[in-house]
Amino acid sequence: MNTKTFSKKLCLGLVVLGLQVCVTDALADHGGVRSLRGDTELTNNNPAVDQKQWQSGKGKVARNYVQQPPVIPHAIDGFDINLKINACMTCHSWNMAPKTGATKIGISHFKDRDGNELADLAPRRYFCTQCHVPQVDADALVKNTFQTTKMLENK
């Protein structure tokens, strides 16, 4: 083995050793980070957690910043959104919203990427849950110091 090859292998070995020491130190001292599993070993099952309640019946959830997609205030289990059907449109389409009392989808959902107005839902807006998520009554998992946009605050 020539000197250059030996040097490369030695450097690589020291880097790997250094990473191993860092990882070992990080695992030994969790740095205040705790697993969502708590102290349960990976080989054991955690007890089932209480299911959170959907915010159904509470009306619209306030937005925190301009252009925030509205959150979904109801369960969506079993709602199909695929190439053949979009179950959200059963209630939220412009035809159905007046009958169901649901919020109509925004006019922005009828524009393509070039800003052209379409007669139907734009393909890039078809999969609702890529932007809109269901909301449950639950405390924040981590401390949050986010401040609502002043113009959206309720007075």
Image (cartoon, rainbow, N blue to C red):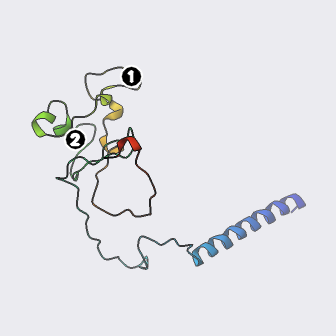
Q: Residue at x 23, y 57 (%)?
A: 54
Q: Residue furthest right?
A: 3
Front-lying residue, 152 or 72: 152
What is the x, y in percent for residue 53? 23, 61
Q: Residue at x 29, y 28 (%)?
A: 107
Q: Is residue 63 visible?
A: yes
Q: Residue at x 55, y 74 (%)?
A: 30
What is the x, y in percent for residue 86? 23, 39
For residue 103, above or below residue 94 = below
What is the x, y in percent for residue 24? 63, 75
What is the x, y in percent for residue 18? 72, 69
For residue 76, above or below residue 25 = above
User: Element under label 1?
Assistant: loop
Q: Residue at x 26, y 70 (%)?
A: 50
Q: Quadrant of residue 100?
A: top left
Q: Is residue 122 visible?
A: no
**Which residue position holds label 2?**
88
Q: Quadrant of residue 68?
A: top left
Q: Residue furthest left?
A: 99
User: Element under label 2?
Assistant: loop
Q: Amino acid at mark 2?
A: Cys
Q: Which mark is residue 115?
A: 1
Q: Quadrant of the N terminus?
A: bottom right
Q: Amino acid at mark 1?
A: Gly
For residue 3, above or below residue 108 = below
